[in-house]
Structure formats: C-alpha cells, structure tokens
Image: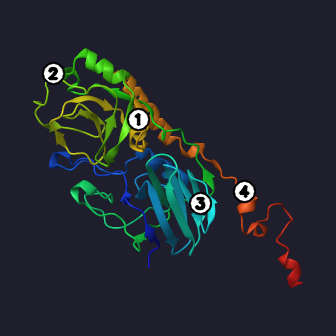
Amino acid sequence: MSRALIVRRAGPGLTLQDRGRPGYMGFGLSPGGAADRLALAEGAALLGQDDGLAALEMAGMGGEFEADSDMRIALTGAPMRAAIDGTRVAWHASHALPAGARLTIGGAEAGSYGYLHVGGGFGGDARLGSRSVHVASGLGQAVESEARLEIGEETAPAEVNRLLPVAPRFEGGTVRVVPSLQTDFFDADQIERFETTGFTRDARGSRMGVRLDFDGEGFHSDAGLSVLSEVVVPGDIQITGDGAPFVLLGECQTTGGYPRIASVLPCDLPTVVQATPGTALRFRFVTLEEAVEAERRAAAHRNGLRSALTPLVRDPHNIRDLLAYQLISGATAGRELEET
C-alpha cells in the first residue's frame, strides 16, 4: 500500500494545488494552481525536490493530519500555528512527521494561504496535466475530513530541520504594475489618482480575484462599459461597474469586458494574494524594462532558495526525547549501564 497522509479534520478551503494548467486559456480554462506560487518553490527548496509537485493549500486555516508512515513535511506561505503531537513547530521550515504522529495546523497568524508539503509530493490522478483543484471550473474538489491523501515516492535526501528565511509578503505594501492594453482608456488624472490612492483588500475575494476598497469616488474610463470582451489574465486589474479595482487571480475568467487600468507583475502577485481583508496596498507603475528586470531577479531568488536554508535550532525544552540524542561525543542516554 502506498504512503498516505490521513486528514482527520479538514479546515475550509483545503485543496491540492501545483503550478496549474497553462495553455488552456483558449479553451476557456484559466491556469489555476497555487494562489501563492512562491510558496511552492519555498516548500520544494526545504524538501530538496521539484517545485512542480502538488502541495496542500490551506485558505486561512489548516486542520488535523495523521501520518500513516514516516514522512517529511514542510510548511510555507501564510504562517499558521502548527504543532506535532502537541509540540509547537516552526513555520517556513521542514520537519520529520513519524508514523502515527498528529500534525495540527490552526488559523493563519498573518496572510491568507498556507501550504503543507510532503516529501515525494501528493499523488492522485492528474487532469489535463495537473493535480490542482480548479474550483471555478469544477475540476476536482476540496479535501474533506477522513480523506486519505496519497503521497509519491521520495527521490530527495531525507533531510529535515531546515529553516528558510522569507522576505515579508504577508502584510501588504507597494505592488508594481505595468500598463495594460486598456490603460490608455483612462485619463491621465485617473491613472495618477490610481497610483497615489491607498487601497485595502475588501472582505470579498476568492481564488478568482479580490476587490479593493478605497476612499473617494470610483475610477472611470473614457470607454465606460463599452469595452468589447477580450482575453484577461491573472494579475489584470479590472475597474468594475461601481468604479472599484478588482485584481484577477489564478482562477479568473478567461475573457472580460471591464476596462483594465493596469496589470500586476507576476512576482508581486503573492503580495496581493496573501493580503487579508483590511490590509493596505498601493500600486506603482514601472516600465517594461524594469518589469523584466524584476522578474529576472525573482527567478534568480527562486533558484537560489536552497542555498539560503539554515539549520533549524530546536529548543531543548521542547524535545521530549532529548536524552536519545548524542549531543556530545562520548555522551549517551545512559541505558548502556543498565545492560551491563
């Protein structure tokens, strides 16, 4: 029987996600995949495996999980309170999860989407080249309590207790954008006001997109609502009928008729994804050359994640089997004397 992680209690919005399904926009299917793609790369670095493997995406809250055999795990994305058999464990780190152990993951302490990775990746049937659940199109379904999640074979060295320093992206901030094909539909004063306005993420949002709140009158284009429906992509910022910006995410529709004032750089989209309701966001236009350089630096950062790993220093007070560790050469647990 293959290895598996048993879901004893599933939080809401628990789904398997990988890099999604690129190449199907022409058939009406957006790419989907993990809301925070950087978190996939971080988990892969912590476990020394490919970032195309599926992970468990947790929207705001995790659940309780049991290992049916010894396995390795990594926790990335929005930090959540996590414990193994009642002992708190670090986020943005890799850990051993022994057979029979219970992993409990609570609510997010910052950000929106957390990720649970396993050594070997989650298995199951792939559809159109991906194991990602695409809620909007009905491809797959959310993970429910008592589900048995199949795990693939390990191909990486069995290393654990690694920590990955992570740059802040869970508390909003400035997001870089480039002009869209319809930015010219907006007057210069509208574009300037968009760039100088402070926004907050609205409570309404999903894997399809998030609405932004702000003070003042709405944004409007010269074209009004007469724009012909055409292709849209994740990161596009549509101005809806009430004048509010709406940032499209991975499961967005593939065409739309609302005018787009800008498009978020892919490397900055995790900042929007991870923003919780009320989190402050601002947008800054950059040139195409600056955008290309930003994406190049982001790719170099992802490729260098493994070199940034550091040993995870555990608190001795939280190590139940401390005496089983040979901490100093020549020192033992003392059991040998009982056998002589």
Residue 269 occupies quadrant: top left
Q: Which mark is residue 93?
A: none
Q: Give the CA separation, mark 4 to mark 1.
A: 35 Å
In the image shown, does 322 or 172 lie closer to the viewer? 172
Residue type for callout 3: His
Q: Mark 4 or mark 3, which is nearer to you?
A: 4
Q: From what the image shows, is residue 122 above or below residue 305?
A: below
Q: Position of residue 218 (x, y in %)?
A: 25, 27
Q: Residue at x 50, y 51 (%)?
A: 76
Which quadrant is the N terminus positioned in?
bottom left
Q: Is residue 76 left or right of residue 178?
A: right
40 relative position to 187: left or right: right
The residue to which callout 3 is attached is 95
Q: Residue furthest top?
A: 188
Q: CA distance from mark 3 to mark 2?
A: 55 Å
Q: Amino acid at mark 2?
A: Asp
Q: Are marks 2 and 1 in contact (CB under 8 Å)?
A: no
Q: Earlier in the sequence, mark 4 or mark 2?
A: 2
> Could you tell me how far apart the alpha carbons at marks 3 and 1 are, in whole angstroms?
28 Å
Q: Count residues near mark 4 (Cα–Cα under 10 Å), then give few for <14, some for 14-19, many for 20+.
A: few
- Residue under label 2: 222
Q: Is residue 48 visible?
A: no
Q: Secondary structure at mark 3?
A: strand
